Image (tube, grey):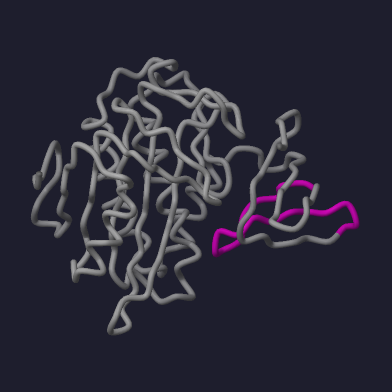
Amino acid sequence: MDGIGIGRKPENGFRQIELNETPSTNLECLERARSGDPGQLWVTARRQTSGRARRGRSWVSEPGNLYASLLLIDPAPFDRLASLPLVVSLAVYDAIRRELPADVDVRIKWPNDVLVEGCKVSGILLEGETLPGGHHALVIGCGVNIAHKPAEALYPVTCLAERGATCSPEILFARLYEAMERLLKIWDRGEGTSTLVSQWRAVAKGIGEPVTVNLPDRSLQGIFSGIDAQGMLLLDLPDGTRQAIAAGDVFFMGQERN
């Protein structure tokens, strides 16, 4: 069903399609891009049957949680896309922060997880594809545990209902829609990244703390010293050198690393 929905303004150029069930909102966006959709399209679903997370992991997708993907076409030059996860994580953070009591701790864990009281509550998956004609489709997938959480997970997990939130998926999506619109304008196709880096650092989890970063071929241990101007993790290694990391799984002291 097509619709504008709660709190969304049609004049900004974003559209929304609401589905009862789909294998994956990300896949739905990609299929529409291949069929010529011009982008600026949100796809939400009540339930996903084949939800996916980073590195091919599955994502629990029962009704009651938020499943939303945003399709953008040619959102920025390729050399500026690395900073886009900053926009996305800040938008999800903002939406979640506004629905929880003020005394509940909400942080962003690099690269784009949102933690509530130290437990993961959301997942973000960015996927891109070059289309016929040379245009680039980029899909931003966002899942938030509102009423349910996975029974087993790589990290400690929670859901918003456990932490005092009473919002529906529709209300949380309205928050996300508004935050994403605002932050994408600040990002300005990568031109405004420095402003978002400052915002991200202010709500980040673990800067200055020892961490383990799992890469595809090895694990590194060091001090998380922050992020650079493009959003890469800066890890101070025991030998005194600093390494910039584009992608990896970060674990804080005491977390399982399976």
Residue 226 is covered by the magenta coloring: yes
Q: Is residue 7 left or right of residue 42?
A: left
Give how far across and how far down residue 80 sits, in percent. Answer: 46, 71
**The magenta stretch spans which residues?**
222-240
Q: Which quarter of the rendered picture does the C terminus lie within?
A: top right
Q: Residue drawn 37% across and 44% down?
A: 142
Give how far across and how far down residue 182 sits, in percent. Answer: 28, 52
Question: Along the line of sight, which residue is nearer the eye, 132 or 255?
Answer: 132
Residue 5 is covered by the magenta coloring: no
Q: Residue drawn 39% across and 19% down?
A: 101
Image position of 9 with respect to 33: above or below: above
Q: Residue furthest right?
A: 239
Q: Is residue 113 left or right of residue 246?
A: left
Q: Residue drawn 45% across and 75% down?
A: 78
Question: Along the line of sight, which residue is nearer the eye, 182 or 147?
Answer: 147
Image position of 237 with respect to 117: above or below: below
Q: Is residue 60 left or right of residue 134?
A: right
Q: Residue drawn 15% across and 54% down?
A: 15
